[in-house]
Structure formats: structure tokens, C-alpha cells
Image: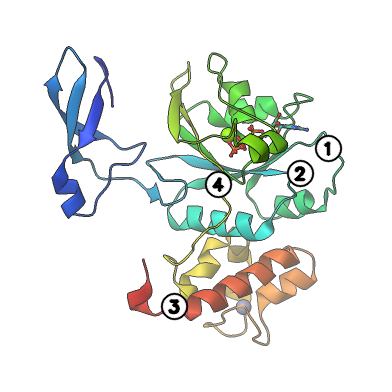
């Protein structure tokens, strides 16, 4: 735990486990110092969280940069759209980053995402492009990254964190020896006051905490149209006179965003209230 007097190594006390509460990276906590010389203590209390995520497991962040690679591996809209919905649900600002723009790729997904209203940045740590924008976005507050393994999260953060050297590695190195992949989540301070969190890559995402009826509010670009649906209780799936479907037809909303919305809605609609996490 970081304190004005330095960093203390802390254990969580048993009473958190009873309350099934676990301290997360990013938590503000009260600690009891056990040994000043050894800089050891116990976490006594977790302050109320502004927000928290299950994946990556972090609390109190201001924004989440959802990192995809333009190629190798190619972007996955299901992952991106689940992640943006989870951010909206938790009132965390999502930023979409498409890295490895130096590789041969198809621009269409990037163009489509620009229609959603989310901030989109296109970067390459090889050609050093888009990195000023990344620096600008991360200069204040707490920023975490999320994305598949190998998309370049640690490489991107290294360009902003001038005096840290986060582990990075090629996909083949990773598969062969399991090396250079990020294994733990850590917050790194920036000179100007912000913090950056590097996180291990992951691909499976649960959206069970979201209710089907809430979902359309979590697709930001839908808000411009949904008041114009013929039925006020339109779920924007197959109803006649749906303004979302019309906006998709008019190329104002990406069709894959609407398709993902429908798939997520149908998935969430099947979940019983007591099954929710
Ligand atoms: N061509 C290209 N390769 C890149 C770029 N950025 C990173 N890489 C390479 O992609 C590989 C993976 O980069 P990492 O930064 O380790 O990826 P990561 O997202 O942190 O991966 P995990 O820690 O496993 O989640 C490395 O070999 C990097 O050199 C880029 O802009 N262009
Ligand atoms: Mg990494
Ligand atoms: Zn509708």
C-alpha cells in the first residue's frame, strides 16, 4: 500500500473474507502498521469505491483503454462491445485503441467505431504513431488497459512510462515458453500525477451483472435515436418502426454493434434474477 511514508506490504484481515470483500488494486484503504521498520501492516478498512471491475480486477479508475490490435490478433467486436457496455454500467469512460497500425489491416472496423462517439485512437509502437494522443489521454487520473494477450498493452504503456520497463514479448515466445506476458496487475505512477495500470491479457468476459432492459443505455450511440422508436417499450430487436434498426440501415450505427446488442440482449434475457452475480 502506498502511503506518504512509503510503500507498506499489507495482508488483508480475515474480516474481509467473511464479508466476501477483497481489496482490489486501486482501492483506498486504512491500514494498521504492524512493523514500521519492515514496512508491514494490515488492511483494516476499504473505503467506498467509485467503481470496480471484475476483469480486469481493479477499483476507482477514471478510464479504461480497450486495446485491440489491427491485426495479429485481429479485433473482436464481441469483446469490445461487452467491454464498452461494462464500462458504461460502471460509469468508467472507455477509450478504444487500435494498436499495431503498422501491420497490413482492414480499416473498416476502426471507421465504424468512430461512429459510436467513443474516443478512438490508432497507434503503433513500431512506427511511433498515435502515442502523443495516448499520453494526452492518460496524463491525469487512473487509467487501466484491457485486451487480449499480445495486442501490445505493455508496449503502449512503456511508451508513456519513460522510466519503467514493463515486460513485453512476442506471441510465439509466449506460447513456447510462456514468457514476457504480463502476469499481474500493477499501478505505475506518472510523473505528472496520473497512474497507469498494466493488466494481464484475457478474452472471456461475463456481462451477467447487466440487465437486458438496461443494455440499450450502455450502447452510447443508441441514445440519439431511441426516443424515435414507434413503441416506447421497443427493445430494438425486431419491432416495427424501430429507430435503431433504421439508423443501422442508414449507416449511422455500425451493423455489428446492433447485432452484438441483440445477441447480448437475448443472452441476458434468459438469466433469472437470482442467477445474477
Ligand atoms: N507490429 C507491431 N507489433 C507490436 C506493436 N506493439 C507491440 N507489438 C508487439 O506485440 C507483442 C506483444 O506485445 P505486449 O506489449 O507484450 O502485449 P500485451 O498486450 O502486454 O500482452 P499480455 O501481457 O500477454 O497481455 C510484442 O512482440 C510487441 O513487440 C505495434 O505497434 N506493432
Ligand atoms: Mg503485457
Ligand atoms: Zn427501437
Foreground tag (4 vs 2): 2
- Label 2: few (<14), some (14–19) or many (≥20) C-alpha neighbours in 10 Å: some
Q: Earlier in the sequence, mark 2 or mark 3?
A: 2
Quarter of the image for residue 121 reads: top right
Residue 140 image offset from top left, x and y in percent: 48, 28
| Above or below, 248 relative to 45 | below
Q: Mark 3 near mark 1, Cβ–Cβ under 8 Å?
A: no
Image point (52%, 83%), residue name? 233
Against 52, is 103 above or below?
Answer: above
Of mark 4 and mark 3, the one earlier in the sequence is 4
Which residue is disc 4 drawn over?
Answer: 94
Q: Which marked residue is nearer to the observer: mark 2 or mark 3?
A: 2
Task: Mark 1 or mark 2: name the one nearer the start of the chain.
Answer: 2
- The CA distance from mark 1 to mark 2 is 8 Å
* Mark 2 lies on residue: 72
Q: Is mark 2 within 8 Å of ligand 1?
A: yes
- Is residue 125 shown to the viewer in this render? yes
**Residue beneath label 1, please?**
103
Left or right: 164 as drawn, with respect to 5: right
Amino acid at each position: 500500500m502506498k502511503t506518504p511514508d512509503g510503500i507498506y506490504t499489507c495482508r488483508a484481515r480475515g474480516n474481509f473474507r467473511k464479508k466476501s470483500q477483497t481489496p482490489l488494486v486501486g482501492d483506498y484503504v486504512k491500514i494498521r502498521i504492524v512493523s514500521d521498520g519492515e514496512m508491514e501492516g494490515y488492511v483494516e478498512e476499504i473505503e467506498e469505491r467509485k467503481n470496480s471491475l471484475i476483469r480486469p480486477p481493479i477499483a476507482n479508475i477514471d478510464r479504461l483503454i480497450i486495446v485491440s490490435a489491427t491485426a495479429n490478433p485481429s479485433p473482436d467486436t464481441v469483446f469490445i462491445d461487452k467491454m464498452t457496455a461494462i464500462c458504461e454500467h460502471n460509469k468508467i469512460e472507455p477509450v478504444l485503441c487500435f494498436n499495431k497500425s503498422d501491420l497490413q489491416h482492414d480499416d473498416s472496423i476502426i471507421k465504424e467505431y468512430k461512429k459510436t462517439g467513443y474516443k478512438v485512437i490508432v497507434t503503433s509502437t513500431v512506427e511511433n504513431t498515435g502515442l502523443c494522443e495516448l499520453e494526452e489521454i492518460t496524463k491525469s487520473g487512473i487509467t487501466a488497459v484491457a485486451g487480449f494477450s499480445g495486442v501490445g498493452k505493455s508496449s503502449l504503456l512503456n511508451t508513456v512510462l519513460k522510466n519503467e520497463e514493463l515486460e513485453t514479448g512476442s506471441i510465439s515466445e509466449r506460447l513456447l515458453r510462456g514468457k514476457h506476458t504480463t502476469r499481474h496487475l500493477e499501478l505505475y505512477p506518472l510523473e505528472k500525477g496520473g497512474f497507469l495500470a498494466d493488466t494481464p491479457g484475457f478474452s472471456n468476459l461475463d456481462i451477467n451483472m447487466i440487465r437486458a432492459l438496461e443494455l440499450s443505455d450502455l450502447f452510447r450511440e443508441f441514445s440519439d435515436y431511441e426516443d424515435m422508436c414507434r413503441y416506447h417499450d421497443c427493445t430494438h430487436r425486431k419491432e416495427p418502426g424501430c429507430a435503431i434498426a433504421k439508423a443501422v440501415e442508414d449507416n449511422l450505427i455500425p451493423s455489428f454493434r446492433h447485432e452484438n446488442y441483440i445477441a447480448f440482449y437475448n443472452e441476458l434475457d434468459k438469466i433469472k434474477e437470482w442467477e445474477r452475480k
